[in-house]
Structure formats: C-alpha cells, structure tokens
Amino acid sequence: MSILIFTETENGKFKKSAFELASYGRAIADPLGVELMAVCFNIQDTSPLESYGVDRLIQISDPSLENFTAHQYAANMAEIAQTHDAKLVILSSSANAKYLAPLLAVSLSAGYASNVVGLPESIEPLRVKRSCFTNKAFNLSTLDNKVNIIGLSNNSYPVSENPKEMVVEQKKAILSETSFKVEKVEKASGQVSIADADIVVSGGRGLKGPENWHLIEDLASTLGAATACSKPVSDMGWRPHSEHVGQTGKPVASNLYIAIGVSGAIQHLAGINSSKVKVVINNDPEAPFFKAADYGVVGDAFEVVPELIKKLKAFKYNE
C-alpha cells in the first residue's frame, strides 16, 4: 500500500501546493507506516521536494505533456497508482486538479472527496471534513471505496519541512494516439498567481478607473502578493478576467485578503470566504464587506493605501 500525491508545476518548478500536499501526505503516511509517493511532469529540479517528506518521486518527461492535459495526466497517474497499489491519491484544489480528479476516479473506481480541510478522521473507511455551501459550513464525508481521492483545499494545511532521502524514478509517458497537445497557455501577467498566493490584494470600482490600479500593484508588490479584482472591474475591461475573484471567478483561500474599493456583493464574498483574514478599505461605512471582514478601514483608498504602503516599507526597512 502507498499514498500518491500529484505535484503541480509551473515553468518547470514545483508550485507551493506541491509542498502543501507533501506535508499533508506525510502526516497521513507516518502513522500508517506506508510509502509516500509523488508524480510530477516535466520538472527541471526535483530537489526542493526532498525537504517535505516524499519517499519516492516518479518523474515523467515528455514535450507533449509540457502543458496540462487532463486525460493524458489522468492516464499516467492511474497507471502509477495501480502499479504501486496506491489506496489514497491526494490532489490540490486547483482548476487543473478539479479536471483531473473525476477522470482519475473513474479510471481507479475510486471515491472522490473535494474541498477537504483537514487530516482524515479515519482511513478505512476514509472519513474527512469538507467545506460546503461556498465555505459557509462543513460536513463530514465517509468514503468506503478500496481507493479514494482527496482534493485538499488550498492553504488548509501548513507546509512543514520533513527531509527524507527521496528516490527519483524516470518513467516513460503513456500517450494516447487520439489525444491532443496543448500548444499554448495564456497566463495572468502578475508575478504571483492567485492560486498560490498567501496574500491577495483586490480592487473594485472604488478605484475609479484602470489608471489608478498602480495602488493595487504597489501594495501587492510591497507585500509579495497577487493582484485580483471584482467582477465589475473585469467586465469593464479595467483588468483581465484572469484576475476576477469570487463565486463566478477564481476562488480565493489566501491567508490574507485585502479588498480595496470593493463593496462586497454576495457572489464576491462567497468566493473569498475561505481566506483566513479579510481586510477591507472602503469609504462607505455601510458597504456589505465590513460585515464579513476581520478588519476594516473606513476611508478614502487614495489616502489610506499610500500611507499603508509607506508604513509597510518603513517596517521592512527597520527589520
């Protein structure tokens, strides 16, 4: 028996979620005394994963799999899981992983629990805590399949180092003749992706126009954060749709979410509710976001944000 995790990569490097899954998988594997395995595609440097408790890494390198294709990735992972008797497969909650999970579940006749927020209460049967109703509640789900898949919510488990002597194996890719190759993937221009960010700085119509977006970018740069926006902002073309967060956009589960000039429509709040700490800056004290926020600043963003940036830079300098 073994546990298998899918380590996602970007530009040939492991994403943060890979280390989160490795830490999570290690915490499950140790009490069971089983091997923690990982699979990666087209990674340039595998050494960073050694610090997070993975016993065996199976590396698949093929130019046709440079960009994610759900069916191809699922076929390769299913073959690995069956070969190594993986009874538990752990994925992240990224868009790619959500495409991959049902295909993998069908191939393995496995159960699939999405939006898992903690370690399993039991393994046989698998009993896990999951968020539901757009993160307004939790439920306990039980899966009694021989093989099960966990979709771990982003930023729901701490990354912890646990160095292991990791065995790296090269494996030839399984390629279907009927499959297609993804030639190009368009990505957001921000330095930090929303999915991987610990901190997200988001702007709304209160910024009054795209010419003022430097306030969001300057604060994000100071904090090492990702930039995001509300739906009206992307609809008006101020920002690309790839930065739209909320129930109808990208979900956010960051450690810190800062909303500037965002009123807080119910769809927006539903999509960012998993963030641990929510801060709002708005000149309207009746803005709905204040009821959902942990901290709020009633004030003009054009005055508050530059002062906040100044204070943060001074704090960093004094460190």
Image (cartoon, grey):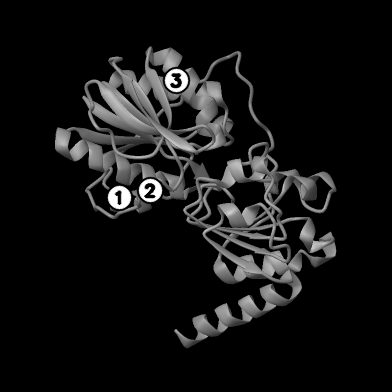
Residue 104, disc: 3
Helix, strand or loop status at disc 1: helix
Left or right of 49 in this view: 229: right
Residue named by callout 1:
52
Q: Is residue 174 visible?
A: no
Residue 129: image location, x then y, percent? 35, 33
Taking depth in this image into account, of 183 and 99 the one nearest to the observer is: 99
Residue 289, disc: none
Label 2 to label 1: alpha-carbon separation: 6 Å
Asked if the residues shown at circle 1 and circle 3 are in contact, with their CB atoms under 8 angstroms apart, the answer is no
Q: Is residue 181 visible?
A: yes
Asked if the residues shown at circle 2 and circle 1 are in contact, with their CB atoms under 8 angstroms apart, the answer is yes
Q: Is residue 27 above or below residue 138?
A: below
Helix, strand or loop status at disc 2: helix
Q: Amino acid at mark 1?
A: Tyr
Q: Amino acid at mark 2?
A: Phe
Quarter of the rendering occupied by the N terminus: top left
Residue 302: image location, x then y, percent? 75, 73
Residue named by callout 2:
19
Label 1 to label 3: alpha-carbon separation: 24 Å
Residue depicted at 70% across the width and 55% down the height:
262
Asked if the residues shown at circle 3 and circle 2 are in contact, with their CB atoms under 8 angstroms apart, the answer is no
Left or right of 272 in this view: 285: right
First-in-chain label (1 vs 3)? 1
Helix, strand or loop status at disc 3: helix
Residue 301: image location, x then y, percent? 72, 70
